[in-house]
Image (cartoon, rainbow, N blue to C red):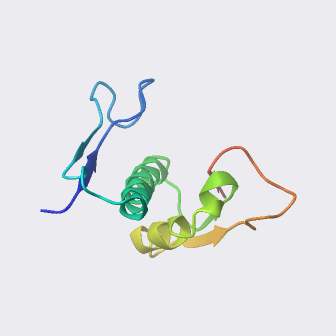
C-alpha cells in the first residue's frame, strides 16, 4: 500500500472535526514525495470545501497554493467541470488565503 494522509491536521475544526490527522506508510518517503502527499491532501480537502460551498465554474488559486506547481493541476483533475485559474507566482498582487471562489 502507498502512503496516506488521514485528516485532520487542523485542531480548530474543519471537515473532520474531532479526528487527529495521521500519516500511514509515510516514514520512508523522501522530502519530494512527502510534499506531493501534502499537496494531494490539501487538494482533496479544498475539493471537499468547494463542493460543500456549492462552488462551480471559475476557481482562482492564488497566494501560497499558487506557488505550488502541483496544486492547480491536481485540483483541476478533481474538478474537471470547473476552470481552475492559477495566479501569478511572483506577481505584486497576492492574497493571504489559498483560493477565491467566483
Q: If the image is split into quadrants, where does the N terminus sit?
A: bottom left
Image point (65%, 70%), residue name = 85
* Left or right, 34 with reference to 76: left
- Locate the C terminus and report the quarter of the image it occupies: bottom right
- Using the image, determine if residue 39 lies above or below residue 81: above
Name which residue lies at 58% across and 63% down: 68
Question: Which of these two is toward me, 99 or 39?
Answer: 39
Q: Residue furthest left?
A: 1
Against 23, is 84 above or below? below
- Residue 86 in the image: x percent, y percent? 66, 68
Give the x, y percent position of residue 97. 66, 45
Q: In the displayed structure, does residue 14 sit left or right of residue 96?
A: left
Question: Can you say whether 17 is above or below 4 in the image?
Answer: above
- Name the residue at 44% across, 76% down: 80
Residue at coordinates 37% horizontally, 56% vertically from top-left? 34
User: Looking at the image, which is closer to me, 30 or 38?
Assistant: 30
In-image side of 94 versus 52 (left or right): right
Task: Locate residue 40, reporting x and y percent.
Answer: 39, 59
Q: Which residue is nearer to you in this view: 1 or 12?
A: 1
Question: How many tags in the picture?
Answer: 0
Where in the figure is residue 101, as x and y percent of width and height? 63, 55
Question: Could you say which quadrant of the image residue 74 lies in?
Answer: bottom left
Amino acid at each position: 500500500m502507498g502512503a496516506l494522509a488521514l485528516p485532520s491536521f487542523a485542531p480548530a475544526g474543519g471537515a473532520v472535526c474531532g479526528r487527529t490527522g495521521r500519516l500511514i506508510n509515510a516514514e520512508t518517503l523522501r522530502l519530494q514525495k512527502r510534499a506531493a502527499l501534502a499537496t494531494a491532501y490539501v487538494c482533496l480537502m479544498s475539493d471537499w470545501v468547494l463542493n460543500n460551498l456549492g462552488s462551480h465554474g471559475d476557481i482562482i488559486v492564488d497566494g501560497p497554493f499558487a506557488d505550488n506547481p502541483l496544486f492547480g493541476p491536481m485540483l483541476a483533475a478533481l474538478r474537471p467541470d470547473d476552470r481552475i485559474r492559477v495566479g501569478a507566482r511572483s506577481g505584486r498582487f497576492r492574497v493571504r488565503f489559498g483560493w477565491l471562489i467566483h
